Image (cartoon, rainbow, N blue to C red):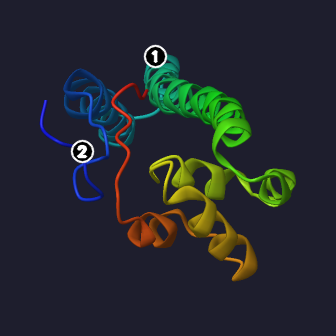
Amino acid sequence: MSEQTLKNHTRFVPSYHFFTLPVFGINFVWSLYRLRYLGLSFAGIFGALLGAALLVLALRARLFALCVQDRVIRLEERLRYERVLPEELRWRADELTVDQFIALRFASDDELPALMKKVLDEKITARKTIKQLIKNWRADYLRA
């Protein structure tokens, strides 16, 4: 596994991103095409609805997994904060948004206190902006 950085930390699951989603998307578009050019029928309408339902199911399943992952990250980070942060900064963790928690997880233990203070004091909320401030990247290979 190559070293994780800001540039390569996103995760693509080929079977999901390059097979399942495109197949469901093509199926939905094909169903609409057939409905439009073969005329309205129960089978045509049901096919288009089924195509839409499958596409929504695939997208929502991914979003549900990411939501659970974000909750677990918040829990892990709170435990890490107990170990790494000074007392006065630990209490400020309640001020962090979900996006700030998620982005700060990539900061090394040494870098975290100063970076967290900066993020809170300057009200930096964008994940990408926070990640760009990290100098010593802490990899996270176990992501959904």
The amino acid sitting under disc 2 is Gln
Q: Contact (CB < 8 A) between labels 2 and 1?
A: no
Q: Where residue 90 sits in the image (x, y, percent)?
A: 80, 51
The one of 59 and 92 positioned closer to us in this rendering: 92
Secondary structure beneath dot 1 equals helix
* Quarter of the picture holding the N terminus: top left
* Quarter of the picture holding the C terminus: top left
**Disc marking residue 4:** 2
- Whether residue 66 sits left or right of residue 81 in the image: it is left
- The residue that label 1 is drawn on is 43
Quarter occupied by residue 67 = top right
Quarter occupied by residue 64 = top right
**Disc marking residue 57:** none
The one of 35 and 74 positioned closer to us in this rendering: 74
- Give how far apart the Cα atoms at labels 2 and 1 are: 48 Å
- Whether residue 95 sits left or right of residue 46 in the image: it is right
- Whether residue 64 sits left or right of residue 22 in the image: it is right
Q: Where residue 70 sits in the image (x, y, percent)?
A: 62, 36
